[in-house]
Image (tube, grey):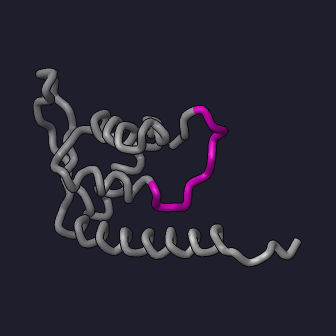
Amino acid sequence: MTTRNTPRMEFLQGTLDVLILRTLLFGPNHGHAIAKHIQRTSEDQLQVETGSLYPALHRLEGRGLVEAGWELAETGKRAKFYRLTTKGRRELQSERSKWEAFARAMGLVLNSSEEDPA
């Protein structure tokens, strides 16, 4: 995953998985549409590369968090569509709570009014 117009940055482990699970909460979709949704909803700040997306989808499928099957895309071509499983919904809920707590903690530290010790 890369960000637009900024140097490549490292994301915390599991970030892409959570983004994919959240995207699939809206319904089944194929890989290209998942990547485009993440890019669009992040206001073009996050761009998911194919080399990261498909291994993540396969990993999620292996963990039983998503299911996949071949269907016709809106273009009329066959595409592999991924859908969130019940286990995937539970995982998303758990991970979302962790991310919200993490973001809050980061905000507290970054926005602290205490003097910088350096």
Magenta part mainly helix, strand or loop? loop
Coordinates of residue 115 in the picture (x, y in percent): 79, 75
Q: Is residue 50 visible?
A: yes
Residue 101 position (above or below residue 85): below
Confirm whether the magenta stretch covers residue 31.
no
Q: Quadrant of the C terminus?
A: bottom right
Q: As rendered, which of 38 and 70 lies closer to the eye?
A: 38
Q: Is residue 54 visible?
A: no
Coordinates of residue 52 in the picture (x, y in percent): 47, 43
Residue 59 position (above or below residue 87): above
Coordinates of residue 117 in the picture (x, y in percent): 85, 76
Confirm whether the magenta stretch covers residue 9.
yes
Farthest front residue in view: 113
Number of numbered discs overlaid on the protein picture: 0
At x 29% / y 71%, what residue is drawn?
93
Q: As rendered, which of 112 and 39 lies closer to the eye?
A: 112
Coordinates of residue 76 in the picture (x, y in percent): 11, 22
Q: Is residue 61 left or right of residue 85?
A: right
Instruction: Provide the residue span drawn in magenta.
Output: 5-15
Q: Is residue 84 left or right of residue 51?
A: left
